[in-house]
Amino acid sequence: MTTAHAASPALAGLRPFHGLPVVETAGLRREPGSPRPVFDQDVWDLTGLADAPVVMTAHRKILDFTAITNPRWRQVAREYLMARMAPLHPDVAILPQAFRFPLNPNSLWSELRHLALWFNHLTSVGITTLSQVCQRHCDVYLAAASRSATNPDRLLSPATTVARIRIPQFLSLYAEILSDCYQTGFSPWPGRSADEVTGYVRSDENRVLPVPDTLLRPLLANCLYLLETIGPLLAAEAAEARAADEHEIASRRGLLIREIDGLREAIERRRKTRTSAPRATKSTVTQRLKNGWSPSDPLLHMSWHPLVVEAAGAMGHRRDLETLRPELEQWVSECGLEQPWCRNAAQVPRHDDGTPVPWTLPMARHQLDATVHAVTSAAYFLTSALSGMRASELVELTSGCRQQEKRPGGAARYRLVSRRIKSEAFGGTEDAWVITEDVHRAIATAEALTGAAPGERLFAKASNNSNSRYTALRSWVNGEYGLRLGLDPIPDGPVNPRALRRTLAMTIAQRPHGLMAVKLHLKHVSVATAEGYAARPGGHQAAFAAEVAAEEEAEHLRLTVAAYEDYQRGILPSGQGARDLIAAFKAVDQALERHDAGPVTVIDDRRVERVLKVKAKTLHVGVGNYCWFSDPGKALCLKLAGTPNAAEPLMGLCDSARCPQATHHPQHRQIWADHVENTQSVFLGNPRLSKPERARAQAAFDRAARIVAEIDTAEHADEEPVHDA
């Protein structure tokens, strides 16, 4: 990672992002009328990002650079983050080691936190400019960053530390545009990645533990019961509660004198029908006692305001209550007090033995809200367990996301439309998940419980934290409500969408062709990811790996035969390895001629493949070339990497214009032609390009143009290819 840095941009007066709007410069969309942060501000307010996913919570949209003590480094932090967000900016695109993909805005908050840790550490040890930083300071920071801030005796995991170590290294990649940078030629921990520095070993193995069956069974059984039996009844009460809220909001006026008689009649009707008076909440009673109410007052525990709102559409005051006290006391003494919600609950069968019981006892409003949250959380976890959706995808579900498709024979297919957030561009990509009918009904119940308008998110209002949802659901099921309904207690243990997704993957993978089903259903990027989820080191996984290897071998043989047939037609390869490849093809001709009396004209395809099979085993396919890896000692990539005895080439380090085992063929021409055009327009056409960078770009342009010319001129079998020394 060592690089020769240019002179400090601060001295050169370079301020590439001065005065630019942050969101627009990064190529993002902003909601009309929302805050418009400018680069030079110490606080970037990104609350107006139009495509922000739910997982990008409110605090992650406020980037406060004042957390960095040194004002000089606040500017550096802004420059670095802006460069990461806008890699196509003219001053960033020409940086040779800069990242070419934009940083996801959801990661900005974490990156700023790590920048603050690094810069504030330097301030604490007396460093005032990055040019003073040496490797000793980096090693001291590593020791500090590896330990917990609250408990210095506790070492952090390498996975946590590696994120803190990357920042000092990444700053060296952007030295040319930073207003303060390291001394020329310095890079923290040169030649070592952050993983190597911290000892972090990455693995494809999925370490998330599946949910044990002893926990999963009662969880799913209780969720189904709550959604199918309790959900519809609870949804009706929730709808009435929302209507009451709207009525109360519209009733912010005082009770008129002429309305007293009407309110007196309403109280009398309730008394005659033996309707209990509504009970006040504990907080209301506590407040009344603080305001001087007598503990023996017969109206102390009666809720007064809901009655006035319902009967008169107004808000009653204490003086109105005193006016109607005789009627109210008679009502309370004859009919008693009862919680206002879920009265006269319908009978439902208990979950354990089917005995009919009221689905609930009368509830206070906060108890009703808690029950709605618990049953909505049941829909959340049932959907997670049976669909395998990630938490980021669950919270993107909206009212109206359900789709139903009639299939031939009368069957139906159900889908949920959400957005894939992980590994996608900022804002995600709309996608659909095939689900069971149980999930379809669960989402319908969640829509009814929340009263969400079409397009409004279902699981993001109350809490999008799966841990708090699980705690609420488990507490409700294991508490007095679940006990009355005969629900199975849910044992202690971690339950979250990641664990449920892993459990579903392992269940599907146990079926025939399950590994591919896991990949498709869970929308994994690769089968390797599905293998990690399914924990299948053998069986279908081994069979699939063997199939891939066989297909790869067959494709390499096909490409080798195609190159041989081009050679026969006079279309020669080019490149440093062309001479050896042509010699190998001539040897093939000779081998075939020994088996035929006449000239080589019509030869059986199988025989050609058998003769070329050994050569095909040396083929490795590059982006713009073929590598015939027959001699590791000749491989330029292995020499550059210092691993001359490797068994395979390092295609990521391939310089096919100089490697003696690389060849170019007609199918590679377009790749190199595009490289010529892009280098010409993006780099050589950029007037801001420095002389060293222009020289490097010109060399790349010349090399690509030469490769294109060689491919074009390699036309006849009797001509030797021309190479540059």
Image (cartoon, helix red, strand yellow):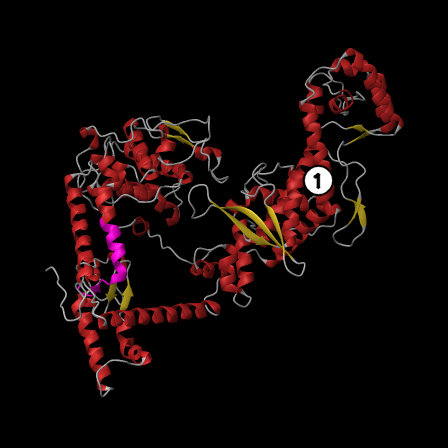
Check the image and name the residue furthest to the right.
272
Which image quadrant is residue 295 in? top right
**Residue lying at 33% horizontally and 41% vertically, measured from the top left:** 144
- Count of numbered badges drawn on the protein: 1
Q: Residue 635, percent across and down?
A: 20, 64
**Residue lying at 20% horizontally and 60% vertically, measured from the top left:** 711
Q: Residue 687, percent across and down?
A: 19, 36
Which quadrant does the C terminus fall into?
Answer: bottom left
Classify 477 as above or below 237. Answer: below
Check the image and name the residue furthest to the left.
725
Image position of 191 (left or right of 167): left
Classify 193 as above or below 79. Answer: below
Q: Residue 272, percent across and down?
A: 89, 26
Task: Estimate how packed mark 1 is, as few (under 14), some (14 to 19) or many (20 or more) residues with alpha carbons within 10 Å.
Answer: many
Which image quadrant is residue 184 in? top left
Residue nearer the viewer, 610 or 193: 610
Q: Is residue 567 magenta?
A: no
Image position of 331 (left or right of 106): right
Query: Does residue 187 appear anywhere in the picture?
Result: no
Check the image and name the residue furthest to the bottom.
597
Classify 649 as above or below 128. Answer: below
| Residue at the disc numbered 1 | 235
Image position of 396 (left or right of 361): left
Is disc 1 placed on a helix, strand or loop? helix
Q: Is residue 661 magenta?
A: yes
**Which range of residues does the magenta coloring cover?**
660-676
Q: Amino acid at mark 1?
A: Ala
Residue nearer the viewer, 340 or 491: 340
**Residue lying at 39% horizontally and 43% vertically, measured from the top left:** 153
- Look at the magenta stretch and give its main secondary structure: helix
Q: Residue 354, percent across and down?
A: 79, 53
